[in-house]
Amino acid sequence: MEMWIVITIAAAFLQNIRSTLQKHLKGAMGTTGATFVRFGFGAPFAIIFLLALTAAGGKPVPAPNPSFVFWVVTAALAQIVAQALLVHLFSFRNFAVGTAYSRTEPAQAALFGLVFLGETVSSGTLSAIAISVTGVMLISVARTAVTPLSLVGSVFSRMALVGLASGTAFGVAAVGYRAASLALAAGMEEPDYLLQASTVLVWAIVFQSIVMLAWMTMRDPGELSRIAGAWKIAALTGLVGATASFGWFAAMTLQQAAVVKALAQIEMLFAFASSVFIFREKINRLEAIGCIAIAAGIVVLVLVK
């Protein structure tokens, strides 16, 4: 099995854990605070990862260049925007449909990869992306009163536009992080995907921490004390989140962002496994069909690659 596949599955598993921890934090703080801990408490661990890699490999930290700085800042901002839009979907009565549209990220990443990096994907890969995205969308609307007619009509709604915009921003972030990592390789004597990924992670997460800290200080300074009160779980969230991000960046250094994000839909299967086996929740027929579609898409993706 190729290394990018192993890394992506591990990153998806860790991201599922991070999401669970963030949901727990929502009881102790607001959405902004729960989002910030992913970056602020993850930054120290990201720096430790980078220092450990340079010490173990005896290689210096890759020197930044203009292309790298442009892409890492663009990707970091796009990721913040994507998260904000995703949170905004909760203000809609039927936000599940909008969330389904945000899951078009792999397909949009394929488009942006072509436009910005000149990367093409095979027809088999596109089919795998379509199958898995369809599965995710089925799961997203499985517990809502949605008919085929209303689903089609929702394409033109404000909710759908917000969801698509979120998916667009996530797609830009994924391609941007891959571009940033590849830009680092241009200045290295010997490319090292782990060192490249770790460097991208440090730059991105420190920048995001500064941006979100400034935002909280101006808009909701009281959130800082709530974060401090839950520092133990916040630190664990930061560790898991930073490790997951390191995995994403490493995988996207080795493989196209669209392909990695298509395989990353396996996170939905991990989430459902937790629901069924840990929380003893039942899944309905549409959710089961969605899970099967995701699994089928992943099988097709692995076979064609």
Image (tube, rainbow, N blue to C red):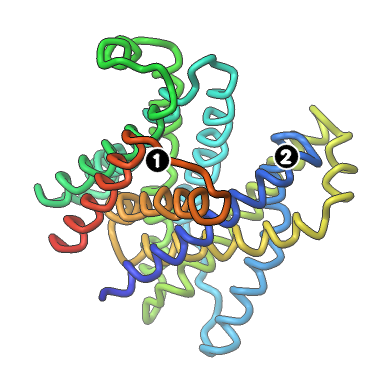
Left or right relative to 278: residue 25 = right
Left or right relative to 28: residue 296 = left
Residue positioned 40% across, 40% down in the render? 172
| Residue 177 position within the rendered picture, expressed as x and y whole percent measured from the top left | 43, 53
- 39 relative to 285, above or below: below
> Label 1 belongs to which residue?
172
In the foreground, 225 or 138: 138
The circle drawn on residue 145 is: none
Between marks 1 and 2 in the image, the one whose residue lies nearer the viewer? 2
| Residue 168 position within the rendered picture, expressed as x and y whole percent measured from the top left | 39, 33
Residue positioned 48% across, 50% down in the render? 276
Binning the other alpha carbons within 10 Å of mark 1 as few (below 14), some (14 to 19) or many (20 upward) gives many
Direction left: furthest residue: 123
Left or right relative to 219: residue 106 = left
Identify the secondary structure beneath mark 1: helix
Residue type at mark 2 is: Lys
